[in-house]
Image (cartoon, rainbow, N blue to C red):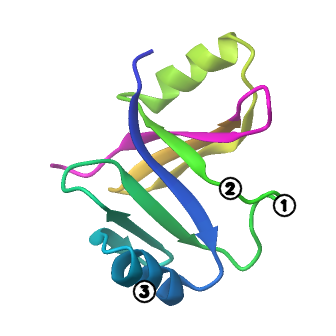
Amino acid sequence: MKTQFLLAWYEVPDLDKAKAFYGGVLGMEMVFEMPGWVELSPVKGGPNIGLALKDAPLSSSGGATVVLKVADIHEARAELTGQGVEFEGEIEEYPGVVRLAIFRDPFGNRLQLAQELMQQ
């Protein structure tokens, strides 16, 4: 399975405040936005920082989720499952945008596979 670093994302309770910080204070440019989700980048064409609107974080420890881009999420998930990786839930799909699958490393750090569906 071949992966490519795509982005890291955080859960935030106030998306407007987060956009003001990352965009205004840190000077990052908006790359993508949809309801409840934005991506900003410090470098054009580089990896992005994603911000997900969440009233209550998915994990009590907070922290970022590292996202790995794959060509075929079903194939990648099957390969990792065969190597003993346990996924949290089913593959999520945002039609026409992305397919996602969350898992953790042996130390509890959250990672996510992403198969982009948008036409470039």
Looking at the image, residue 70 sits to the left or right of residue 63; the answer is left
Q: Nearer the viewer, mark 3 or mark 1?
A: 3
Disc 3 or 1, which lies upstream in sequence?
3
What separation in Å lies between label 1 and label 2 (alpha carbons)? 9 Å
Q: Which mark is residue 60?
A: 1
User: Which structural element holds mark 1?
Assistant: loop
Q: Which mark is residue 20?
A: 3
Q: Residues within 10 Å of mark 3 (few under 14, many from 20)?
A: few
Task: Using the image as rendered, state which of residue 54 and residue 26 is in the foreground.
Answer: 26
Q: Which residues are magenta?
A: 104-120
Disc 2 or 3, which lies upstream in sequence?
3
- Compared to residue 69, the image places residue 118 above or below, namely below
| Residue receiving disc 2 | 63
Q: Residues within 10 Å of mark 2 (few under 14, many from 20)?
A: some
What separation in Å lies between label 3 and label 1 (alpha carbons)? 24 Å
Task: Using the image as rendered, state which of residue 108 and residue 21 is in the foreground.
Answer: 21
- Circles 2 and 3, Cβ within 8 Å, touching? The answer is no
Place of residue 53 in the rendered image (x, y in percent of width and height, measured from the top left): 58, 76
